[in-house]
Amino acid sequence: MKTGWFVAAGAAAAGAVAGLASSGLLHKAAVATTCVGMKVADAVTAETQRVVDDANDVAAEARRQAKIDAGVADRLAALEAEIRAEVTAKVDAEGAEA
């Protein structure tokens, strides 16, 4: 008995789908759904590209800052050697006088 209801429901559903297909509604719904899907895909692609661009900007700024930091460290190292020599000479001179 239950099988009969399933068969009847399936036949009714098949008839409804066939009716929608013959009237063009099924095609229009499929086109509308596909259009929405394409719009969503375009929005996701655009947002993904913005994220990639932002990440590239952050990486470029990090590389720039690393170069600046390395240059400053090199200059400080050179200055430190000169300053250390001057201070050592001054302390040694003061020590000789004391």
Image (tube, rainbow, N blue to C red):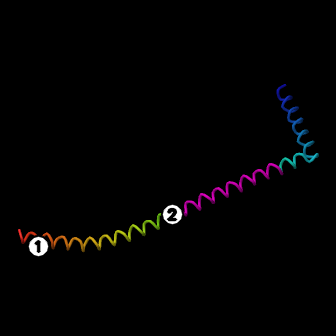
Please report the residue visible at 30 percent of the width from the left and 71 percent of the height from the top: 77
Q: Quick one: label 2, few (<14), some, or many (20+) residues within 10 Å? A: few
Q: Quick one: label 1, few (<14), some, or many (20+) residues within 10 Å? A: few
For the residue marked with disc 1, what is the amino acid?
Answer: Ala
Please report the residue visible at 87 percent of the width from the left and 49 percent of the height from the top: 28
Image position of 53 with respect to 31: above or below: below
Instruction: Find disc 2 in the rendering and name its residue.
Output: 59
| Quarter where residue 2 is shown | top right
Query: Which of the numbered marks, if any, corresponds to residue 93?
Result: 1
Q: Magenta residues?
A: 31-58
The percent coordinates of residue 8 (x first, y second) are 88, 32
- Of all residues, the one furthest to the left in this rendering is 98
Image position of 66 with respect to 41: above or below: below
Please report the residue visible at 70 percent of the width from the left and 54 percent of the height from the top: 43
* Quadrant the C terminus occupies: bottom left
Closer to the observer: label 2 or label 1?
1
Queried whether the magenta region covers residue 56, the answer comes back as yes
In this view, the residue in front, 27 or 95, is 95
* Alpha carbon separation for disc pair 2 and 1: 50 Å
In this view, the residue in front, 84 or 14, is 84
For the residue marked with disc 2, what is the amino acid?
Answer: Ala
The percent coordinates of residue 82 (x first, y second) are 24, 74
Is residue 24 toward the left or the right of residue 89 in the image?
right
Is residue 39 toward the left or the right of residue 77 in the image?
right
Query: Which of the numbered marks, if any, corresponds to residue 21?
Result: none
